[in-house]
Amino acid sequence: MLKKLKILDESDKRLRKVSDNVTFPLSIEHKELIKKIIKQLKYSQIEEKQEKYNLRPGMGLAFPQLGIHKRIIVIVEEVEENKFNNHVVINPEIISHSVEMIAAEAGEGCLSVNREVEGHVRRYARVTIKGFDEDGNKIKIRAREELAIAFQHEIDHLNGILFYDHIDKKKPILNEIEIRFI
Ligand code: NI
């Protein structure tokens, strides 16, 4: 069974609010919610479950997308077929990043944006993130390529930023000289 999460749509102004830092210990409710998010993101990337529950595929979600303005992000990364790495980061901060920028060639998607958005989003190719795990232990994560994009996308949500805010309105489509695509 999967009780689907209610994810706010981009038309909802609550997505534009800046979220608050989290203090520890985490509440039981928040811990439960993290588990539910992991499950849904994972299911959304498994074809059979995706169809069964009619899920839009997605690898990340931030708490404000559920209307909860707390700095918590969850990323479920498929490392090989149907094998996943879960990343839960509380109060995440990008402490360093590459000079090199990349963009997802097909553009980015978001579970709060229920339409196709054309355009490339420039992101750092590599980022180092610090934050805390669910038990309040300090963590540091180095991410590159797709995972780096996911972290930047989710951290943006904590600051009320949606991916298309980064798309250049005058020149939404970049070419291979301007950016390295992944
Ligand atoms: Ni998103």
Image (cartoon, helix red, strand yellow):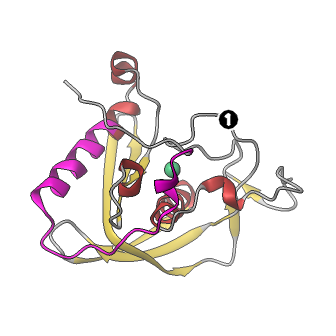
How far from the left and from the top, in percent, is residue 82? 35, 34
Q: Residue at x 74, y 52 (%)?
A: 120
Q: Quadrant of the N terminus?
A: top left
Numbered circles on residues, count: 1
The one of 109 and 104 positioned closer to us in this rendering: 109
| 104 lies left or right of 16 | right
> Badge 1, how many Cα within 10 Å: few under 14, some, many 20+?
few
Residue behind label 1 places its C-beta within 8 angstroms of ligand 1: no
How far from the left and from the top, in percent, is residue 91? 34, 73
Asked if 58 appears above or below 181 in the picture, the reply is: above
Label 1's element? Answer: loop
Q: Could you tell me the amino acid type at mark 1?
A: Glu
In the displayed orientation, state which residue is furthest to the front.
13
- Answer whether residue 103 is visible to the viewer in this image: no
**Range drawn in magenta:** 11-40
Q: Residue at x 32, y 51 (%)?
A: 85
Q: Residue at x 70, y 68 (%)?
A: 101
Q: Which residue is mark 1?
A: 116
| 101 lies left or right of 73 | right
* 26 falls in the magenta region: yes
Residue 163's quadrant in the figure? bottom right
Residue 2's quadrant in the figure? top left
Asked if 48 appears above or below 80 in the picture, the reply is: above
* 51 falls in the magenta region: no
The one of 80 and 101 positioned closer to us in this rendering: 101
Asked if 179 appears above or below 115 in the picture, the reply is: below
| 167 lies left or right of 19 | right
The one of 105 and 109 positioned closer to us in this rendering: 109
